[in-house]
Amino acid sequence: MNRIRTPYVTDAPMPIDDALQRLQRAIERLWQLAEDGGDTWDAHQAERALQRIRGVLTPCNASGTSSVQ
């Protein structure tokens, strides 16, 4: 049985741009795994979700840092 290794995760805040980049890399890996297995539905859904997130953040001028001071 294949085990999925979970990278070290912290609760520390990070810029939005960094979080989106990490999500994009995870989706790219999901595509690779899906293509090997022949089922790309989950990867396609994840990619669509990322596009929707970016679609919401772009009009808000989310630039990677919080405006909270």
Image: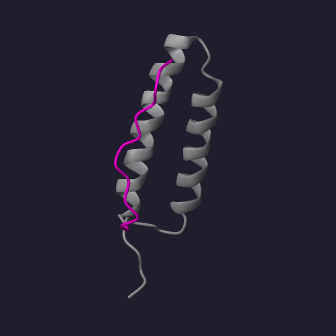
Above or below residue 10? Residue 51 is above
Whole-percent x, y for residue 13 in the image: 38, 68
- Magenta stretch: residue 28 in it? no
Residue at 61% x, 49% y is 52
Q: Characterize the magenta stretch by its predominant secondary structure.
A: loop
Percent coordinates x, y for residue 36 in the rendering? 49, 12
Quarter where residue 40 is shown: top right
Q: How many marks?
A: 0
**Looking at the image, residue 7 lies above or below residue 44:** below
Task: Give the extent of the magenta segment.
Answer: 1-13
Question: In terms of depth relative to the viewer, which is nearer, 55 or 17?
Answer: 17
Q: In the displayed structure, does residue 40 sit left or right of residue 63? A: right
Q: Quadrant of the C terminus?
A: bottom left
Q: Residue at x 37, y 71 (%)?
A: 65
Question: Where, by quadrant of the figure, is residue 29 drawn?
Answer: top left
Q: Please, is residue 1 above or below residue 44 in the view?
A: above
Residue found at x 57% / y 53%: 53
